[in-house]
Amino acid sequence: MLRLRTRGHRERGAAAVEFALVLPLLLTLVIGIAELGRVYHIQTSLSGAAREGVRVMALQNDAADARDTVQDAAAHLAVTDDQISVTPTACTDASAQTATVTVTYPVQLLFGLLGSSITLTGKGTMRCHG
């Protein structure tokens, strides 16, 4: 008949010790994934807002409307006018001219694993009038 081995007296706390050693690494990994997801969401929001803004600039030739569009598209980020760059300020009739909208946004990291803050940039470029 087969006998199942029971854990010896010395092995009783081994699982708890192994868990205590692995837990900090596991928590660091989970926190890093959450922080990376948050930063990626902000980056895609900035890129999308810049694309929306440059579309308005290229088609309507109005830098103020382009800035307003960027702020509306990234309303949850509270982007200010100082963080939005529209170049050129007016599209000319030159067929090869392009408009560019750049949005910079400082992100405060929640856990500080990679530092206290980073600056993200979203950029959109489109041919004027077209």
Image (tube, rainbow, N blue to C red):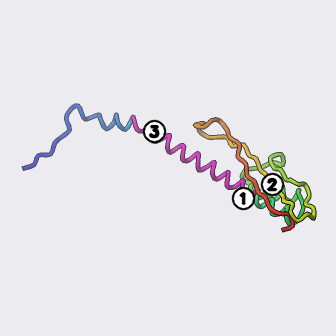
Quarter of the image where one finds residue 5? top left
Q: Nearer the viewer, residue 76 or 99?
A: 99
84 or 97, nearer to the observer? 97
Q: Secondary structure at mark 3?
A: helix
**In-image side of 21 versus 70 (left or right):** left
Q: Which residue is mark 1?
A: 48
Residue, x 20% and y 38% (percent of image)?
A: 7
Task: Confirm or deny contact between disc 1 and disc 2 (CB under 8 A).
Answer: no
The residue tagged 3 is: 25
- Point out the image quarter for the C terminus: bottom right
Magenta stretch: helix, strand or loop mostly: helix
| Element type where label 1 sits in the image | helix
Q: Give the distance between the C-alpha atoms of the residues marked 3 and 1, in whole angstroms.
A: 34 Å
Q: Quadrant of residue 110?
A: top right
- Asked if residue 24 lies in the magenta stretch, the reply is yes
Q: Residues within 10 Å of mark 2 (few under 14, many from 20)?
A: many
Q: Position of residue 97 (x, y in %)?
A: 87, 60
